[in-house]
Image (cartoon, rainbow, N blue to C red):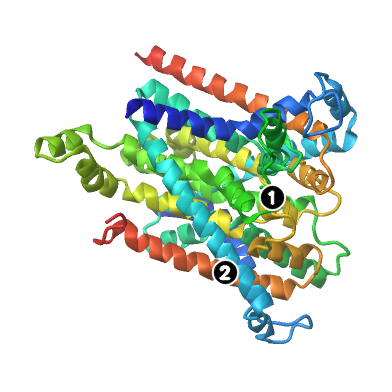
Amino acid sequence: MKTKSYMARIMAAPHILWAILFIAAPMLFVLYYSFTDASGAFSTENLRLLLDAKYLTIFLRSMAFALVATVICLLVAYPLAYAISRATPRAQKVYMMLIMLPMWMNFLIRTYSIMAILEDNGFLNTILNSLGIPSVHIINTSAAVIFGMIYNYLPYMVLPIYTVLSRLDVRLLEASADLGCTPAQTFTRVVMPLSRSGVVSGVTMVFVPSVSTFYISQKLGGAKYDLIGDSIERQFQSAYNYNLGAAMSLVLMVIILISMAIMNRYSDGEGGLVA
Amino acid sequence: MRALSKIYTILIYVILYAPIAVMILFSFNSINSTGIFAGFSLHWYQELMKDAATLTALKNTLILAVLSSLISCVIATAAAVGLSKMQNRMLRSAVETLTDIPMMNPDIVTGISMMLLFVFVGMRLGLSSSLSFVTVLIAHITFNLPYVYLSVMPKIRQMDTHLTEAAMDLGCTPFQAFLKVELPAIFPGVLSGLIMAFTLSLDDFVISYFTTGSGFETLPIRIYSMTKKRVTPDMYALSTLIFLAVLILLILSNVAQRDGKKKKK
């Protein structure tokens, strides 16, 4: 028994050491840089600066964009996941593979390709013009940025919702119909509550990358829609204000922790997300 | 109702694949444009083969993915086995919470937090540049750990612990019991963790971007610096090749799975 636990410790030790050095310590460095100035002295100046209108706008805009993208993803993905889960097992596999396949393309290329389509003299307008329809201006608008988020993260929403819906016991639906529910009532009273855990993880998996993204808005929104991610990237790669960048990351983490806490209440609590 | 859901499904797939179709189409463009298609040619594929920097980046990406997935796989598998045997539940849940942080955090936060650590330590050591291949490798191993751990752990839970005890009763040392009994039992989990880690590492841009030095460029970073200027269709050619490789791999693994199932029957 003793040698057994001795070996268990040796096996777990490298991982524990690694996690302390490269997961815990970096988090402490974010805290340290957030609360110091360039000379290393204690300062709350970075966090105070984030309350300026300039940065406040960036944070509110990021949250608004991410929220809109998440809601649209949910509205688009739910019926899709439902339709897939009703198909034959073989077809389900193919459908889901086709949903995940675009994720294997680098997201930079995917985003760039969307840009090439939406541009004023891009592919979309070329087609529209050849059909005699006047050009539309989409690129460099907030709609283009949000479309980029939806496009890139939609599979993260479809996957968990599909997973819960495909495990749904069909007999429950039959029972509900036998007991006098209309199909719509069965859907709102049986299917939706049972798929709540999938919805919750889908929402989290779309919201987190959307609120923290950089690059998407640089490419699809011109320079007009600065998001938190872009702002953080600038502090580290061109402005070299690590302290301000760390403070922004800290606030971003807090925003995400709060939204996760809110979502978790819905996943297990008695209250209905869909009610 | 059924027709409606079919139309809806098709519409979503069309939108999902439109950018990819456009990318593949324009990789065969005969002129330097990603908006106007002038005619079919393999010009950009030839250009790609001549582009030494991109080929180096491809090689770097593969080296990084192989090393980081193997190392993270060894570390996390050993930890999952070790932790599952410890009586100390507090320690185990503390380690699991800590390990999950890179998975929960946005990539950009993971990236900059590690960059801060490396830069700080580098400054203290008086290094001229603190970011290099080693730092990006450390970063990739770190963000791979939770994925390997999470795919190995369920297999360990399913494993019959009596088998290990039987092996040791029959004279195996704990290490032999691990190699001969436990490892084969959890191997499917280890393998899927390894593949997951490999693909995550291959595809990562954000974390590499913040933790790599000027001397080490991965493919996603190369793509990023190229999309800062105007992209020429050779990037599309490269992405088309990667896309085809992934498609073939997926089809092969599906066929292999089906054949495996048939044999079992």
Quarter of the figure with the C terminus of chain B: top left
Q: Nearer the viewer, residue A48 or B16?
A: B16
What secondary structure is found at the residue carrying circle 1? helix
Tally the numbered discs: 2
The reply to whether discs 1 and 2 touch (Cβ–Cβ < 8 Å) is no
- Residue B127 falls in image quadrant: bottom right
Q: Which amino acid is tagged 2?
A: Leu
Say which quarter of the image contains residue B157. top left
Per the rendering, the mark at residue A60 is 2
Q: Give the residue type at disc 1.
A: Leu
Report the residue at 86% width, 31% height from top: B32
Give the class, few, some or many, for how many residues have Cα within 10 Å of label 2's Cα (few <14, many ≥20). few
Gap between marks 1 and 2 measured at Cα: 19 Å
Residue A173: x, y in percent?
Answer: 19, 36
Residue carrying label 1: A220
Residue A139, compared with residue A27, is above or below; it is: above
- Residue A253 horizontal/vertical position (percent): 55, 67
Q: Residue at x 59, y 41 (%)?
A: B197
Q: Position of residue A22 (x, y in %)?
A: 63, 61
Q: What is the x, y in percent for residue B114? A: 68, 62
